[in-house]
Image (tube, rainbow, N blue to C red):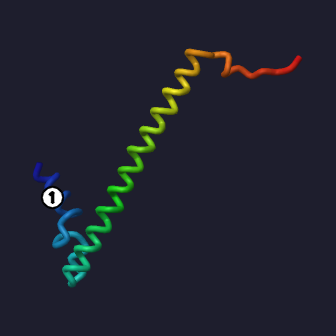
Amino acid sequence: MKKVLHTYNLIMDSSINPLKNVKNLQVRHMVMQLLACMWSLIFGMYIVESIYAIIITMAVFDTASRSPESFTRRTKR
């Protein structure tokens, strides 16, 4: 647990992470806020894309159970 807390502080505590070199506290805070927004957007997009993948998979499975012939290639002979 101590290692987890230490790792968390290395990333989230601006007095420990490399942003400690930025002397202006307001700028340091703004950079941390921008990083937080960026990561929130990334995780949000990941969740939405996962939901879309689940919906597409469900639609494919539904089509396969209702009309499996739609997956076979139709050729003129």
Q: How many marks?
A: 1
Return the residue nearer the eye: 7 or 69: 69
Q: Residue at x 49, y 26 (%)?
A: 58
Return the residue nearer the eye: 5 or 33: 33
Q: Is residue 14 above or below residue 7?
A: below
Where is residue 10? Give x, y as percent.
Answer: 20, 63
Where is residue 35? Give x, y as percent.
Answer: 31, 65
Image-quadrant location for residue 5 = bottom left
Where is residue 67? Give x, y as percent.
Answer: 62, 16
Q: Is residue 74 left or right of residue 54?
A: right
- Which residue is situated farthest in the front direction here? 66
Q: Residue at x 89, y 17 (%)?
A: 77
- Which residue is situated farthest in the left direction here? 2
Question: Tag 1: residue type?
Answer: His
Q: Residue at x 43, y 40 (%)?
A: 50
Q: Is residue 15 above or below residue 73?
A: below
Q: Residue at x 47, y 39 (%)?
A: 52
Q: Is residue 23 left or right of residue 62?
A: left
* SS for dot 1: helix
Residue receiving disc 1: 6
Where is residue 22? Give x, y as percent.
Answer: 24, 81
For disc 1, the neighbor class at 10 Å (few under 14, some 14 to 19, many from 20) is few
- Which residue is situated farthest in the bottom direction here? 23
Q: Is residue 34 above or below residue 55?
A: below
